[in-house]
Amino acid sequence: MLQGRKRSDLGFYGTAIDNLVKRGILKVYKSQGRDDYCLLKAHRELVISVLKENADKYNFISSLHLERIR
């Protein structure tokens, strides 16, 4: 969910998510008629480390609750 983000930045989020799907880091699946995304476990540690390294640069990362990623 992208609440609290600038409307003008939504295209950037969509592009980033599409790129992660193309690279095989995220997987798309249908849930209740909408597209949901999941992080593939094979890439979990890499993604968490990259997010932690960049948490100070990008405010939105702190709202992701990295400790909840399984």
Image (spheres, helix red, strand yellow):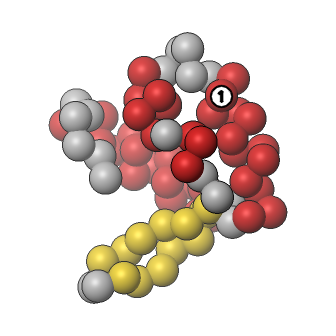
Q: From the viewer's perspective, is residue 67 above or below residue 42?
A: above
* Residue that sits furthest to the top in the current view: 56
Residue at (37, 74) in percent of width and height: 35
Q: Residue at x 55, y 66 (%)?
A: 38
Q: Which residue does the image show at 40% across and 83% down from the upper left?
A: 30
34 sits to left or right of 19:
left
Crowding near the residue tagged with mark 1, few <14, some 14–19, many ≥20 C-alpha atoms within 10 Å: few
Residue bearing mark 1 = 52
- Of residues 25 and 39, which is closer to you in this image? 39
Q: Is residue 8 visible?
A: no
Q: Is residue 50 left or right of residue 65?
A: right
Q: Is residue 59 above or below residue 41?
A: above
Whole-percent x, y for residue 7 in the image: 19, 37
Query: Three-letter amino acid code at disc 1?
Result: Lys
Quadrant assignment for the C terminus:
bottom right
* Residue 33: x %, y % from top left: 27, 85
Q: Is residue 48 rendered to the left or right of residue 26?
A: right
Up the image or down, 45 lies above or below 56; here it is below
Question: In this rendering, does residue 46 appear at all?
Answer: yes
Vertical side of 12 occupied by 70: above or below: below
x, y (%) of residue 68?
A: 55, 49
